[in-house]
Image (cartoon, grey):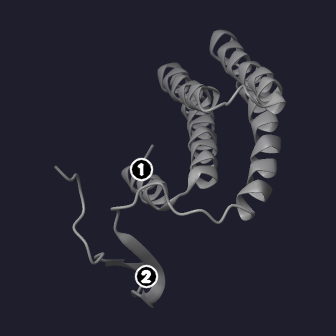
Amino acid sequence: MEQEQVKAFTRRISQSNRSGLVLVVYDIIFTYIEEAKEGLSAGSYEAFREALRKAQRGVDELIRALDFHYAVAKELYALYVFAKEAMEKAIIKKAPEEADGAREVLMNLYTAFTEAAKQDHSKPLMQNAQQVYAGMTYGRNHLTETFQEPEHSRGFFA
């Protein structure tokens, strides 16, 4: 993953509420799946394998976030396990089409979570993070982002 993508995901994480954070994890997984396919097409099996392992770790995070007090969690768990197994088959067979099956299942879930996130108006999970405003000003070839310092200090309180 490129450094610019890491910064963008970090920024999104710092500004996200619970449902927004789930969407960020899905986006990270999709990025790694695409990176895996690019690695294999470039002839690097090691890059393919490493990117899919990272995508599997993203799915592990989704599994850990499940609350099994709700019936839907069991169904989500089965789909997540299917996605992980499909990625593992892709690694073993060196077949990116296996990873496409996992991506398709996860994309359907992503669409559902996107709709659910539209109804979540809770505060961001990170309370002491900088506020980021994009689109206020434009540079010559890029969008300029403005960081606004909060009225209270950031970081840990002792």
Residue name at image x 58 percent, y 50 percent: 18
Give the residue at the far left of this rendering: 158
Looking at the rendered structure, the kind of residue marked 1 is Val
SS of the residue at dot 1?
Answer: helix
Picture layout, residue 117 above or below residue 146: above
Q: Residue at x 42, y 53 (%)?
A: 10
| Residue shown at the point (53%, 63%) measured from the top left | 123
Q: Which residue is mark 1?
A: 6
Residue under pointer 2:
141
Please tell me the numbered disc located at residue 119: none
Quadrant position of residue 91: top right
Q: Quadrant of the N terminus?
A: top left
Vertical position of residue 18 compared to residue 55: above or below: below
Residue situated in front as seen by the camera: 63 or 119 = 119
Q: Is residue 47 left or right of residue 76?
A: left
Q: Position of residue 115 (x, y in %)?
A: 79, 58
Lateral position of residue 58 relative to residue 7, left or right: right
- The amino acid sitting under disc 2 is Asn
Q: Mark 1 touching mark 2, by CB under 8 A?
A: no
Q: Residue at x 79, y 20 (%)?
A: 78
Picture coordinates of residue 68, whole percent (x, y): 72, 25
Q: In the image, is 149 to the left or to the right of 31?
A: left
Q: Nearer the viewer, residue 5 or 117?
A: 117
| Along the line of sight, the residue nearer the viewer: 108 or 31 | 108
Residue 49 is situated, as x and y percent measured from the top left of the image, at: 54, 20
Q: Is residue 6 above or below residue 68?
A: below
Mark 2 surroundings within 10 Å by alpha-carbon count, few (fewer than 14), some (14 through 19), many (20 or more): few
